[in-house]
Amino acid sequence: MFILDDILLAPLHGLVWLGRNIQDIIDRELFDEEPIKEKLLELQFKHEYELELMSEDEYRVRETELLERLNAVRNAKEEA
């Protein structure tokens, strides 16, 4: 009887395993500070050395967005 249960429930176990792996990947992407820090450094570099490519207003908007994301990640880590 247990072998039959294993055979019938195998697809369900596979979906659960897949769901957990997808959730782990999403958590790493959403709560990893490094990509956000890299984008912030890249933005600062572009602003300092390539001023003609980005206006001051655009720089401030993008910088604010990245800093808000970074703060959100840090707050989420503190709550967990």
Image (cartoon, rainbow, N blue to C red):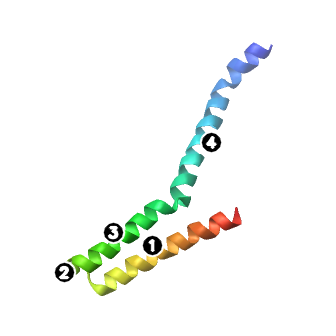
Instruction: Give the CA separation, mark 4 to mark 3.
Output: 33 Å
Task: Tell which circle, 4 or 3, labels the residue nearer the N-terminal end.
Answer: 4
| Secondary structure type for disc 1 | helix
Quarter of the rendering occupied by the N terminus: top right
Disc 1 residue type? Answer: Leu
Per the image, the residue denoted by label 1 is 66
Q: Are marks 1 and 3 in contact (CB under 8 Å)?
A: no
Instruction: Give the CA separation, mark 2 to mark 1.
Output: 21 Å
Q: Residue at x 33, y 86 (%)?
A: 57
Disc 2 residue type? Answer: Glu
| Secondary structure type for disc 4 | helix
Disc 4 residue type? Answer: Arg
| Secondary structure type for disc 3 | helix
Q: Residues within 10 Å of mark 4 (few under 14, many from 20)?
A: few
Instruction: Give the CA separation, mark 1 to mark 4.
Output: 28 Å
| Secondary structure type for disc 2 | helix
Per the image, the residue denoted by label 4 is 20
> Residue 75: x and y, percent?
63, 70
Quarter of the rendering occupied by the C terminus: bottom right
Residue 42 got which mark? 3
In the image: residue 69, left or right of residue 57? right
Q: Residue at x 68, y 18 (%)?
A: 7
Q: Are marks 4 and 2 in contact (CB under 8 Å)?
A: no
Task: Tell which circle, 2 or 1, labels the residue nearer the N-terminal end.
Answer: 2
Per the image, the residue denoted by label 2 is 52
Mark 1 or 3: the one toward you: 3
Instruction: Give the CA separation, mark 1 to mark 3.
Output: 11 Å
Residue 59 lies in quadrant? bottom left
